[in-house]
Image (cartoon, rainbow, N blue to C red):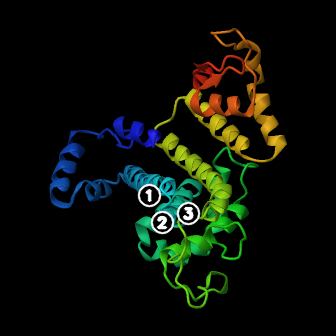
Amino acid sequence: MQMLAEYEKARAHLVRFKFRDADEADEFERLANEVGSIEAMKQLGRLDTVRRVAINTITMGMVSDCLHHIYEALRCMERRKVVVAFNLLRKPLTDSLIYLAWMLGDEDGFYEAFSKKSPAGLAPKIVGNRRQAILQAALEKTALKGVIQSDWLHAVLFKDDFERGLYKTLQRAVHLITVSREAVKTEPENFNFIFKNYADNDSYDGLYEVLPLVLLFLAHVIEGFYDRMKAMDPGARTAFKVRTITSMFLLSDDPNRINETRKVLVKLSRILACPNCNKPLILTQHNMARLLMRESFRCTGCRTVTPFPFSYIF
């Protein structure tokens, strides 16, 4: 959300270009009054500019819609309105994410479909046959190679028989009755989620396991778009990648990945100390999470919380 707000505030999505001469400027103004700015640029042969305007506009609109849905879904999860949350998650995770991944991984192919074959070329039935390839191509453009696998992402979001997947849950949350696929089929004498006790914790189990990784992928796809739109500060880009990936390692049960995070932060533990009691920083799992996500650490002696601008290291 912060990245979106900053790019909107900076108007980074706006495309600027110089006219070749005064005659072209006059012709653009005349055509724009008749057929609109985009068509005017097309008639003037400014096709690269038209493409960039289209991609930037789609990016800002789709990312905004996607993040608002996710934000409200997480708020609903906090209030145990789980069915509403699953409804809100379905659009960004099974629709928007694929189109965003397609734009990042194969901008040429996406723009060809958008500009010459829309809407049929963008239909879910067409896109559905290429989902895993789209996810793989997008992963190749991010820093997540080796962290997330495209076949896992595809299974989580679109395979109804994947044990820890979201597909079955999201489909049932949207429809009262599901009968077309056996794995998603509504039980006899039942309606999906209607009789579910809101206090049951099992609705959160699978979500906690897979949603953070899906959102990590989405965040890196968005970062890739924004960096194309207007190049990010190199230090900010590196800080984003280090903080998001190592934070995800801390959420795993894999001791090897937790140790990888500790290796990244070990130099800080040798130079940082509590300003209150001078006790050196101890890299507990809590403190590693604090440094990465809250940019602070807590003394294991006197419990004082000290701010530390972790991102500025980069």
For label 1, count other residues whose C-alpha is less than 10 Å away and answer few (under 14), some (14-19) or many (20+). some
Q: Nearer the viewer, residue 78 or 223?
A: 78
> What SS does tag 2 mark?
helix
**What is the distance, in whole Å, between disc 3 and disc 1 at their CAs?**
23 Å
Which quarter of the rendered picture does the N terminus lie within? Answer: top left
Query: Looking at the image, do the residues carrying marks 3 and 2 touch, with CB atoms under 8 Å apart?
Result: no
Q: Viewed as shown, does residue 124 lie left or right of 239? A: left
Give the spatial CA distance, label 1 vs label 2: 8 Å
| Residue under label 3 | 199
Q: In the rendered view, does 304 fall on the left or right side of 47?
A: right
What residue is rendered at 55% in x and 60% in y?
Answer: 102
Q: What residue does disc 2 label?
A: 91
Image position, residue 111 (x, y; %): 47, 61
The image quarter containing residue 251 is top right
Q: Is residue 284 above or below residue 142?
A: above
Q: Are marks 1 and 2 in contact (CB under 8 Å)?
A: yes
Q: Secondary structure at mark 1?
A: helix
Whether residue 183 is visible here, answered yes or no, is yes
How many numbered discs sit on the rendered protein?
3
For marks 3 and 1, give the one nearer the viewer: 3
**3 or 2: tag closer to the N-terminus:** 2
Mark found first going from the N terminus, 3 or 1: 1
- Amino acid type of the residue tagged 1 in the rendering: His
Which residue carries the number 1 mark?
69
How far from the left and from the top, in percent, is residue 43? 29, 58
- The residue nearer to you, when weighing 197 against 84, is 197
